[in-house]
Amino acid sequence: MIKRTSFTVFISVVSALFLREIQTRFGTKKLGYLWAVIDPMVKLVVFAALRLATGTTMQGIDLPVFLATGILTYNFFSALMMTSLNAFDGNRALFVYRQVKPVDTIFSRFFVEFLVMCATIILFVSIGLYFGMDLRVKDFNMVILAIIWFGIFGFSLGLLFAVINTFYETFGKIISFISMPLFLLSGIFYTVASLPPLARELIWYNPVVHFIEMIHGNYFRVLNTDYVDYTYMMWWTIIPLFLGLFFYKKAEKKIIAS
Amino acid sequence: MIELKNVTKYFKIDDEKKYILKNVTLTIPSNVNLGILGRNGAGKSTLLRMLGGIDFPTIGTISSPNSFSWPMGLAGGFQGSMTGRQNVKFVCRIYGKREAELQAVIEQVQEFAEIGDYFDMPIKLYSSGMKSRLSFGLSLAFDFDYLIIDETLSVGDENFKQKAKDALMKKIEHSNVLLVSHSMADLRKICHAGIFINDGKIFYYEDIADAIEAYHNINSVQENASASSSSAIYCSDGKCFDNINDAARFYKVRPMSIVQALTQNSGSNVYLKKVFWRDGQNKLPFQNWQNVVAGETIISSDGVIFENAQEASFFYMERIPKANIDKMHVSEVMQHENSFSKKLNVKFYYVSEYQ
């Protein structure tokens, strides 16, 4: 057999897992591929309707666009975090192929979720254009940076949680419990500036808020990023990533063999 | 070549360490087909997985410059909701096959597995036989330095088994084999060298015949030891014997027949249709022989059960050298209508028909 470099092996494994993941997640049901994008869109429509029903409006912003920027990116982040939890367990059977390393499954899920997000964004933009919404972006590059950073943040948490979850199964349950209110506490439906001072102080400790604020502030002309603390975000990305990789390296053989 | 350096492997069960290997240093040379023998639970499969790089020693290192297959015939690496074709594609992709080569592999596997329309149906609808066929066919499509085989040479019906063996023999011309098997015939046929693993110790033999002998010796020593410790044997017809030999003499069967019943079939002797149990143990209900291999399992009129004809001929060759039976005597006898061997003064039946 021809010797392959470890990088080419990594690439072929991740891409094979990527295709497989897409086939099993969406390809087995009728309209499966459509479901992948419908799910976040339904969320979007429900919350837009709720906001419109309460009659709140924001000066200079189309409400659906405001919600979409939050929900679609948050969906990307949380899917990364939550699907990684059982990535090792769910793919245990594949570790009989020695070139499949557990971490590859998390990489492949990263790309799958990224693809899903891109597809929903494209769908949303076409709907937005059709209805004549205001889709203009203030600082396109910063928005892209924020989304990618958000993704890396989700990846690091996902990796760390996946390793811990292999050894302490209750951990996963705790995480899914915590993540339920997280959706409401992440500044997706409101801006931090619009909150009362006490709530502002408290919500500030939630790192996800910073990412959403960064996206909002760079997307809309009328909003700013005054409340975003880049150092805080950096710590929240680097520490889980380091711990995740560290524990993974220590536990890799155990994960494969168990 | 595979190098083991100071390898120790144990499992922790209730804070007690169960050793499979204890500080083993060993080099397995290149171009050697290796058979691994040991009793059930001795750690053969774990050793095999460690050599193949999908399990790891607790202490020490195992290194090799060669490529290894996944454990062949295992259906474990398949995704149930995907079709056979999709699963084959997946494995090709992780082995870095280009899209152009994919089609050739798929055709080859499809032809070998002979599962027809099922190839495009989800794997969860497959029978275990179909899964093994697919898996076996798939592993033949790649070129590995070492093929890892864990007791899967007896998959499927007679026809497929022969085909699989032929394909494997052809494959072996270019690659080596690491084989775990209970079939001494297969081990003799395929392997050159042997590893015998017992109680955390590992013995490497350059000749597989020596390894098999070591394995038999350990087995008989343990049989004798256990026979003498609780020697009294009870039978379901109310009789009691001092030891296995007495019981065997009384019922006119070989002692092996009763040993087999006691150790492998929870006391039930299929030939006598009686249940045996040792002093101090409980009587279990009668049950038929469970490990019937695709209608090939043979029972002889002196009570012993064999996995196949070849195993039977080896058995008699060892016990009755005077009869001078050549290798395939038993299978020749089986071809005749009354299945009676004049040389051995024994009649043979297929277990499936006898029951």
Image: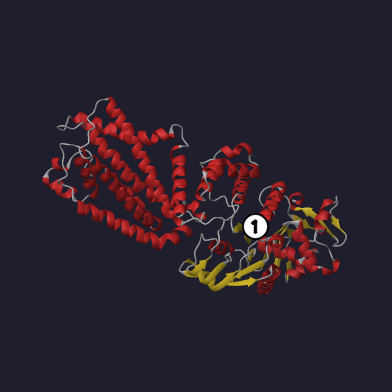
Which quadrant of the structure image shows residue B344?
bottom right
> Quick check: B123 left or right of A237?
right
Q: Nearer the viewer, residue B180 or B244?
A: B180
Q: Nearer the viewer, residue A225 or B31?
A: B31
**Relative to A84, is B303 above or below?**
below
Task: Identify the amino acid type marked 1.
Answer: His
Residue at image point 67% right, 57% down: B173
> Quick check: A26 left or right of A221?
right
Which quadrant of the structure image shows residue B347?
bottom right
Q: Farthest right residue? A: B342
Q: Farthest left residue? A: A197
Q: Which residue is mark 1?
A: B174
- Give the crowd class for mark 1: few <14, some 14-19, many >=20 residues within 10 Å: few
Residue B199 position, x and y percent, is 58, 71
> Quick check: B109 left or right of B22?
right
Label 1 marks a residue whose chain is B
**Relative to A53, is B252 above or below?**
below
**Relative to B38, is A32 above or below?**
above
Q: Quadrant of the N terminus of chain B?
A: bottom right
